[in-house]
């Protein structure tokens, strides 16, 4: 019985191995690898080991590999540093009452856009207006007394000149006049104080902006000493223009300051793929944060459309300048290997050459190359999967590029 079991297992193993070998042969035939697939199982040859990094092996014997290429050409490329930005209101004002009173009327809706000077809240001013009427009556009385004192002083001077009066009487009249004038000045100051308090009963917008929530409604008693959250009648945020705060590594500080010394440094606030608003750097912090090694800056951006909202996180692009003749390639062309980034360059019209490059920066789907490529060369953008150094290729230009005429072999 045990022998039968072993015989069955041996048959099943043979069937499985045969199916695996047949499947691998079919895959190799479809890919055009042919006998090279079997050779690959035996391990890389000494010649392949001597090739540079990347995909080692011989050119595909099954025919040229179709690839999509792009021509390397110098063009103007902006020098951009990306950072995480936070949208901040230029002015954020908490509106509070400056006197103890009752809220009589709310003249604004929650979330409304208001202009500087607009009436927002109205407090009870009846008591203050009564005090104003009382002090104005006192001022009129003071003026009448001052006029009488002036006439008395004039008569006392005349009598003294004619020898019918005394110096004491003249001095007493002068003192009385000055005291009444001082009282008049005091009452006029009191009147101004009451007028100022009456102005506090009308709370107006100190800046143009957007009103937040309004927790207090008409009839609520407001007090100056109240420190609770409800003591704030509303918060007014200035949203046009607006600030975008960002932090960049300290290694860029010298370049940023040099760019700011030459001209305004542009900052792009990227809201999403289709919405972007631009402004200029308006503020640079006077110290580097030692904890993070970054320096904070703020960009002032026009925001009439209110595309930017206080507290919002966005991507900030700080444009240091423009490199006039930068060599750039589409980012998909750049591959990463053990020795660094590399690309496949099409040589002699149909031969792929693995080339090490130096990458300066990547932005907007393009990679700026600082070494390893020359203008006019073709790099492979799509079709890297089957490429090896020296492989035969059938290049096809990208859709946005004209085909390049074939070059004769040297």
Image: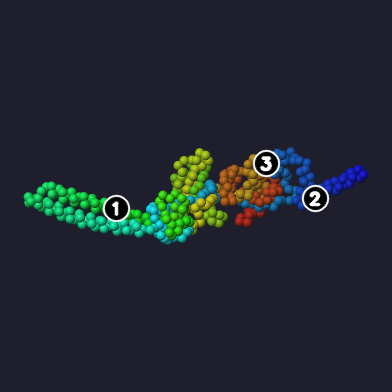
Q: Which residue is mark 1?
A: 190
Q: Who comes first in sequence, dot 3 or dot 1? A: 3
Tell which tag, 2 or 3, sits nearer the viewer. Answer: 2
Camera-side residue of 348 and 225: 225
Q: Position of residue 110 (x, y in %)?
A: 47, 59
Query: In which quarter of the view is residue 126 placed?
Result: bottom left
Instruction: Name the secondary structure under disc 1.
Output: helix
Tell which tag, 2 or 1, sits nearer the viewer. Answer: 1
Q: Residue at x 50, y 39 (%)?
A: 290
Instruction: Name the secondary structure under disc 2.
Output: helix
Determine the CA span between mark 2 and mark 1: 103 Å
Residue 131 visible in the displayed image: yes
Q: Are marks 2 and 1 in contact (CB under 8 Å)?
A: no
Q: Who comes first in sequence, dot 2 or dot 3? A: 2
Q: Position of residue 211 (x, y in %)?
A: 46, 57
Residue 23 numbered mark, or none: 2
Determine the CA span between mark 3 and mark 1: 89 Å
Residue 53 numbered mark, or none: 3
Camera-side residue of 192 and 333: 192
Q: Position of residue 63 (x, y in %)?
A: 73, 51
Q: Position of residue 203 (x, y in %)?
A: 39, 56
Tell which tag, 3 or 1, sits nearer the viewer. Answer: 1
């Amino acid at each position: 019985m045990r022998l039968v079991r072993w015989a069955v297992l041996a048959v099943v193993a043979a069937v499985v191995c045969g199916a695996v070998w047949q499947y691998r042969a079919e895959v190799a035939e479809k890919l055009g690898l042919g006998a090279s697939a079997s050779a690959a199982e035996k391990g890389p040859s000494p010649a392949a080991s001597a090739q540079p990094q990347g995909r080692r092996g011989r050119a595909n014997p099954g025919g040229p590999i179709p690839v999509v290429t792009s021509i390397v050409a110098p063009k103007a490329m902006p020098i951009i540093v990306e950072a995480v930005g936070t949208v901040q209101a230029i002015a954020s004002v908490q509106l509070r009452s400056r006197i103890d009173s009752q809220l009589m009327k709310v003249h604004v809706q929650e979330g409304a856009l208001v202009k500087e000077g607009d009436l927002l809240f109205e407090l009870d001013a009846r008591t203050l207006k009564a005090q104003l009427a009382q002090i104005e009556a006192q001022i009129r009385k003071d003026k009448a007394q001052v006029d009488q004192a002036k006439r008395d002083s004039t008569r006392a001077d005349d009598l003294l000149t004619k020898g019918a009066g005394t110096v004491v009487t003249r001095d007493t009249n002068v003192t009385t006049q000055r005291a009444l004038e001082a009282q008049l000045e005091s009452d006029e100051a009191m009147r101004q104080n009451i007028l100022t308090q009456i102005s506090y009963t009308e709370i107006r917008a100190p800046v143009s902006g957007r009103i937040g929530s309004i927790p207090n409604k008409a009839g609520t008693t407001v007090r100056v000493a109240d420190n609770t959250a409800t003591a704030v009648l509303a918060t007014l945020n200035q949203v046009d223009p607006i600030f975008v705060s960002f932090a960049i590594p300290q290694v860029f500080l010298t370049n940023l300051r040099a760019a700011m010394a030459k001209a305004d440094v542009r900052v792009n606030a990227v809201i999403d793929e289709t919405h972007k608003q631009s402004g200029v750097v308006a503020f640079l912090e006077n110290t580097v944060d030692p904890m993070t090694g970054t320096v904070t800056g703020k960009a002032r951006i026009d925001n009439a459309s209110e595309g930017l909202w206080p507290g919002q996180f966005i991507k900030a692009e700080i444009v240091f300048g423009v490199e006039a003749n930068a060599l750039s390639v589409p980012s998909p062309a750049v591959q990463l290997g053990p020795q660094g980034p590399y690309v496949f360059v099409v040589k002699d019209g149909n031969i792929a050459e693995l080339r090490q490059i130096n990458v300066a920066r990547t932005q907007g789907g393009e990679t700026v190359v600082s070494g390893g490529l020359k203008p006019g060369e073709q790099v492979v953008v799509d079709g890297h999967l089957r490429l090896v150094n020296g492989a035969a290729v059938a290049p096809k230009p990208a859709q946005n590029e004209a085909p390049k005429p074939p070059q004769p072999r040297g």
